[in-house]
Image (cartoon, rainbow, N blue to C red):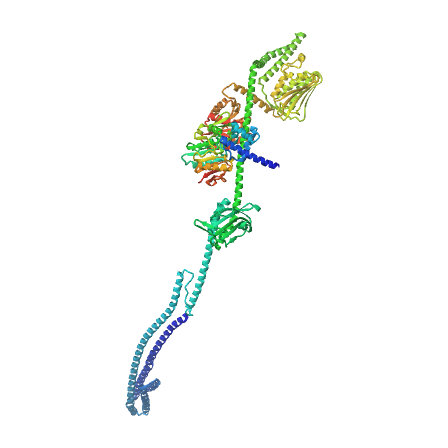
């Protein structure tokens, strides 16, 4: 039976039971109700009607009695009326009583009652009629006898009826009580029956349902415990829902089984894949540290052979290219000595063939004597041999040969495929890595080579320098030897030297003497002139001539003395040069002014010309220049009787060896005088010499002019030359440097002073010649503390250096600007106005002083200060208080050139 | 034809060179057989020209019979290029990176290989002095050239390079005044004797001599550039043996351990200054 049916039946039964129960109880209640209704309606109606009849009878009787008692007439009508009414209601009650359902005795009684009723009424009417007829007696009689009798009978009937009915009611009530009790009992019975039936039905339904469900549940529960892919099934017994569930479950179980199967398959594959991947990854990580093909081959074969269950393996790597390509055995697993080849050409043997074809070769039918895999306890032939190529971009780079006792599983083959494909890439990358490495190594070697070459070069440079120094040394040695020779020569010519000294003494003496001489001479000249003027006119013309002679001779003497003084000054080196800007045009004007009168006096033509390309100004000592020009022109006028004298100022077209300058200014004095013979051209520049001794009287003069001029010209960095032919006139040319006149002269001066100093130094034995490094150097000391300056100055001057000083940075810069020859600066840091840092920065901004050594004087243990010093441009630093030895060490280092 | 001749000629020169080096080794005990070939070529030919002989064989004869010539060749083959605080950045790196690590040791041993005339050794001494480590340090300064070792012992250097040295000193992070460490004379500067109190100068030949101690720091700058690969590896193994674990190896700025036999034993400590640290 179906579940649904069972449920319908079960619940239906219960509902039907309920309906039956309810309807039975309803019918019983109806019965009870019915009984009660009968009691109430019929019995009660009958009793009521009987009572009405009783009353009406009474009323009729009473009224009839009233009528018979001769009542007042007015009341008569009321009595009559009442009697009529009572009769009607009596009649009606009787009729009603009859109309009710009656049975047995009741009917009989009612029948009798009616009968008597009718009779009573008839009697009434007869009484009425008799009364009206006035037969009152009769009426009374009749009333009292007949009617009363009937009435009495009727009362008896009514009582009997009443009793009967009451009895019937009592019976009915009893009946009802019995019915009720029965109904209650019946109800109990029905309810119990219903409950029992309901329980029964329920139990049946529930049991039949749970039973099948439990069976299913137990089977389903079992499923969880089943571990295999076979699941328990349900028996399909009926066509009911359980059957449907069972078959659905069976479907599901089957589906589950399929699923499990698939999952298992899938996980197997995944496991294989993961194993594969793990192996491949392991191989890949293994490749990471490999640096050579050999290493790779070893690792690969020892790893892969056991991995795929093979017992023997060889790795052949390709070497060479093209026709020379060979597959060489690089590594082996379980190697034995009876191998065939260490090397194969492409296509040679299976190994070569494999490489040539670029595909796997597998051998399964292996003859017994093909190869034996051996262990300590025996040897056996493999069952399968596999040759695999490893290629990269179509080129086989290696071949791997494996032999195994078992056939390779598909998984192992897959692994081999994977491994071989990555092997090609790896080999390629290792080869390129090796190449890169080789190149890098080569480059490293080249770098090192470069370094060694550079060091060698440095060394050679050093050697060259050493050689240079040696040469210098040799040169110095030879110098020294020359000096020694010189010394010998000096000793030999001691007298001459003494003479020279005496000559210098003479010059000095002369210089002094000339000065001493000039004073009285001047008095002499003035007095002679006064005499010659003869203001008092007391002298004879002869005497005036004498005085004139005295004056002119004195004048000559004065000139001579002046010349001697000049010469002496120049020779003793006391003469100073004061270069300044000299306008050439001024030179011209001055010369013209001075010599035009002379020219006119002597009747000579005199011209001064300047070429157009001349600079406007030159840098020289104007007084000296004029002195030379004056000398040269005086000479020209002196030795020219007729013709012309000219001064030509221009630029030299050729270089003069004596002057190192780009531009040379020439001052050429040309005359048409007597000229100078070739042999005399040098003599005339010597002191006290004239071209011709005999003519000296004729032309007069001291003969000092030219020698003084030449010396002065040299002092100015120039030179005097002569071009002349005897009798044809002469040209004296003064060459002066155009631009760097000053520098040259300064250099000369410095050179002179150094020379002087060296001479002086030689006389001080404890200071060696090499102190030349320090001697004569100009040091600028910048310090705001005068005591420091004094202390440093004393020490520095003790080493024959010159010192200039400044009391702050600003002053230092000014001093440096006006003393460009400063060699080294000692710079204090903490100073008012401008501190050392700023001063150094400003000095370094000038490109000229980029390399000028500046030594900063810093406070001790002020690292920050020192760093700042170097940043500001100091070359080095020394901490205060200054250690003099350290200071001179530093100065030696930084003055080294 | 010419090519073949040159080829033959080269071959011959190679043989001559091998013979010369072998002869020097056998007779004088100096082993130049594994020096870098181009270097040998240049130096030997330099000597050939200077000695006015015509071939390597000619030089060989002279060298074997005139010890003076050997001395000169020896000088040619020992390149003594150095300066104080050479590559200041190296010394700066040493000062800033290695010194803090050395401070932990109770005593420090430094080997200065190929010290030449000693400028760098004195530089190291000054650096250690300034860092307060000099008192517990012993510097072993060695060179194969005895002349150089003697020179280095004196600590007298030419005046002319002092300006550059001062600059180097400052760039190398000098903390005091460089002039505190020397006294200048006319041509030279004499470094303060206290700087060499803890320096041991000795002759040592990397090719033939063995390790003589273990060191915390080995400075071997621009020494191996004259060697061929074989000798470089040999020297590296010698240095490796002489270095304590976690010790430092300082090489020249063109050198490196990368392609040598001992590349794996070192970790780059400062790759620009070529300072390596022994890690195993």
Q: Nearer the viewer, residue B46 or A263?
A: B46
User: In the image, is residue A169 above or below residue A411?
Assistant: below
- Return the x and y of residue A259 as percentages of the image width and height: 45, 60
A363 left or right, relative to A249:
right
Image quarter (top left, top right, bottom left or bottom right) of the N terminus of chain B: top right
Q: Quadrant of residue A480?
A: top right
Query: Can residue B189 be seen at all in this image of the molecule?
Result: yes
User: In the image, is residue A725 above or below residue A337?
Assistant: above
User: In the image, is residue B114 above or below residue A680?
Assistant: below
A718 left or right, relative to A836:
right
Q: Residue furthest front?
A: A369
Count numbered badges in the picture: 0
Image quarter (top left, top right, bottom left or bottom right) of the C terminus of chain B: top left
- Return the x and y of residue A321 as percentages of the image width and height: 56, 46
Q: Nearer the viewer, residue B216 or B25?
A: B25
- Return the x and y of residue A264 as percentages of the image width and height: 45, 58
Q: Quadrant of residue A174?
A: bottom left
User: In the image, is residue A90 above or below residue A571?
Assistant: below
Query: Can residue A453 be seen at all in this image of the molecule?
Result: no
- Return the x and y of residue A78 as percentages of the image width and height: 33, 85
Q: Nearer the viewer, residue A157 or A136?
A: A157
């Amino acid at each position: 039976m179906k579940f649904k049916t069972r449920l319908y039946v079960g619940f239906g039964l219960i509902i039907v039971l309920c309906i039956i129960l309810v309807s039975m109880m309803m019918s019983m209640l109806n019965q009870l109700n019915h009984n009660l209704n009968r009691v109430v309606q019929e019995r009660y109606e009958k009793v009521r009607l009987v009572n009405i009849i009783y009353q009406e009878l009474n009323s009729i009787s009473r009224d009839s009695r009233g009528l018979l008692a001769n009542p007042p007439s007015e009341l008569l009508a009321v009595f009559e009326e009442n009697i009529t009414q009572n009769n009607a209601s009596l009649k009606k009650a009787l009729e009603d009583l009859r109309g009710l359902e009656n049975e047995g005795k009741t009917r009989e009684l009612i029948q009798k009652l009616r009968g008597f009723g009718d009779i009573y009424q008839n009697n009434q009417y007869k009484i009425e009629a008799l009364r009206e007829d006035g037969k009152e007696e009769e009426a009374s009689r009749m009333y009292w006898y007949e009617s009363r009798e009937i009435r009495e009978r009727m009362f008896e009937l009514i009582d009997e009826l009443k009793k009967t009915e009451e009895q019937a009611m009592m019976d009915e009530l009893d009946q009802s009580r019995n019915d009720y009790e029965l109904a209650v009992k019946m109800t109990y019975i029905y309810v119990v029956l219903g409950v029992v039936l309901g329980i029964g039905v329920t139990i049946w339904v529930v049991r039949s349902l749970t039973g099948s469900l439990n069976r299913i549940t137990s089977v389903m529960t079992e499923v969880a415990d089943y571990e295999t892919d076979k699941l328990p099934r349900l028996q399909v017994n009926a066509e009911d829902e359980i059957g449907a569930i069972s078959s659905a479950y069976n479907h599901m179980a089957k589906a589950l089984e399929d699923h499990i199967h698939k999952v298992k398959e899938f996980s197997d594959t995944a496991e294989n894949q993961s194993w594969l991947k793990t192996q491949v990854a392991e191989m890949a990580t293994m490749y990471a540290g490999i640096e050579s093909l050999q290493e790779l081959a070893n690792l690969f074969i020892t790893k892969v052979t056991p991995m795929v269950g093979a017992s023997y393996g060889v790795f052949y790597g390709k070497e060479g290219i093209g026709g020379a390509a060979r597959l060489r055995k690089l590594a082996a697993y379980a190697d034995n000595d009876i191998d065939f080849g260490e090397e194969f050409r492409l296509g040679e043997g299976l190994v070569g063939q494999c490489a040539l074809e670029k595909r796997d070769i597998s051998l399964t039918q292996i003859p017994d004597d093909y190869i034996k895999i051996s262990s300590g306890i025996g040897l056996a032939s493999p069952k399968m041999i596999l040759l695999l190529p490893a290629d990269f971009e179509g080129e086989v780079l290696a071949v791997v040969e494996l032999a195994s006792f078992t056939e390779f599983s598909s998984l192992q083959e897959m692994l081999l495929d994977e491994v071989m494909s990555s092997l090609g890439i790896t080999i390629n990358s290792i080869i390129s890595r090796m190449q890169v490495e080789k190149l890098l190594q080569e480059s490293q070697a080249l770098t090192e080579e470069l370094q060694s070459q550079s060091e060698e070069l440095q060394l050679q440079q050093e050697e060259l320098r050493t050689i240079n120094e040696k040469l210098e040394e040799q040169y110095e040695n030879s110098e020294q030897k020359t000096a020694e020779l010189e010394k010998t020569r000096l000793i030999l010519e001691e007298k001459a030297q003494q003479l020279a000294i005496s000559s210098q003494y003479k010059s000095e003496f002369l210089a002094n003497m000339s000065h001493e001489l000039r004073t009285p001479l001047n008095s002499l000249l003035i007095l002679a002139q006064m005499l010659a003027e003869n203001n008092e006119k007391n002298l004879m013309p002869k005497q005036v001539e004498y005085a004139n002679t005295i004056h002119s001779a004195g004048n000559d003497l004065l000139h001579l003395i002046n010349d001697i003084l000049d010469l002496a000054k120049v020779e003793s080196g006391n003469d100073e040069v004061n270069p300044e800007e000299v306008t050439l045009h001024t030179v011209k004007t001055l010369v013209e002014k001075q010599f035009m009168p002379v020219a006119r006096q002597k009747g000579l033509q005199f011209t001064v010309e300047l070429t157009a390309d001349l600079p406007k100004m030159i840098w020289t000592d104007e007084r000296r220049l004029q002195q030379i020009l004056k000398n040269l022109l005086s000479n020209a006028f002196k030795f020219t009787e007729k013709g012309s004298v000219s001064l030509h100022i221009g630029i030299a077209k050729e270089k003069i060896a004596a002057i190192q300058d780009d531009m040379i200014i020439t001052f050429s004095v040309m005359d048409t005088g007597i000229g100078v013979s070739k042999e005399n051209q040098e003599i005339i520049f010597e002191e006290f010499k004239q071209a011709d001794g005999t003519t000296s009287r004729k032309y007069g003069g001291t003969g000092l002019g030219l020698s003084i001029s030449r010396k002065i010209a040299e002092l100015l960095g120039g030179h005097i030359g002569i071009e002349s032919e005897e009798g044809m006139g002469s040209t004296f040319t003064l060459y002066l440097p155009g631009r760097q006149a000053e520098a040259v002269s300064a250099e000369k001066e410095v050179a002179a002073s150094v020379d002087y100093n060296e001479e002086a130094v030689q006389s001080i034995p404890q200071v060696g010649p090499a102190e030349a490094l320090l001697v004569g150097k100009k040091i600028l000391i910048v310090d705001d503390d005068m005591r420091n300056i004094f202390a440093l100055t004393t020490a520095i001057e003790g080493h024959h250096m010159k010192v200039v000083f400044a009391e702050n940075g600003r002053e230092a810069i000014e001093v440096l600007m006006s003393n460009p020859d400063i060699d080294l600066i000692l710079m204090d840091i903490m100073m008012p106005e401008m501190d050392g840092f700023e001063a150094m920065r400003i000095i370094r901004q000038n490109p000229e002083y980029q390399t000028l050594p500046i030594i900063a004087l810093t406070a001790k243990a002020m690292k920050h200060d020192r760093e700042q010093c170097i940043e500001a441009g100091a070359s080095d630093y020394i901490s205060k208080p200054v250690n003099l030895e350290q200071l001179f060490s530093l100065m030696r280092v930084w003055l080294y050139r | 034809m010419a090519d073949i001749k040159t080829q033959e000629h080269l071959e011959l020169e190679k043989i001559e060179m091998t013979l010369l080096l072998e002869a020097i080794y056998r007779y004088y005990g100096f082993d130049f057989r594994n020096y870098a070939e181009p270097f040998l070529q240049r130096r030997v030919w330099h000597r050939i020209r200077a000695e006015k002989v015509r071939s390597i064989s000619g030089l060989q004869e002279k060298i074997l019979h005139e010890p003076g010539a050997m001395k000169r060749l020896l000088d040619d083959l020992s390149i003594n290029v150095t300066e104080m605080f050479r590559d200041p950045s190296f010394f700066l790196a040493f000062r800033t990176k290695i010194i803090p690590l050395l401070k932990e040791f109770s005593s420090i041993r430094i080997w200065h290989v190929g010290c030449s005339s000693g400028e760098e050794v004195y530089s190291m001494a000054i650096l250690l002095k300034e860092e307060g480590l000099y008192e517990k340090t012993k510097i072993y300064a060695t060179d194969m050239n005895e002349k150089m070792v003697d020179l280095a012992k004196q600590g007298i250097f030419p005046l002319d390079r002092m300006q550059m040295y001062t600059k180097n000193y400052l760039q190398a992070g000098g903390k005091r005044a460089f002039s505190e460490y020397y006294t200048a004379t006319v041509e030279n500067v004499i470094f303060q004797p206290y700087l060499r109190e803890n320096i041991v100068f000795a002759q040592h030949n990397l090719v033939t001599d063995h390790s003589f101690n273990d060191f915390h720091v080995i400075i071997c700058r621009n020494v191996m550039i004259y060697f061929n690969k074989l000798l470089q590896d040999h020297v590296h193994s010698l240095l490796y043996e002489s270095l304590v674990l976690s010790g430092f190896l300082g090489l020249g700025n063109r050198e490196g351990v990368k392609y040598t036999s001992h590349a794996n034993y070192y970790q780059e400590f400062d790759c620009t200054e070529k300072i390596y640290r022994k890690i195993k």
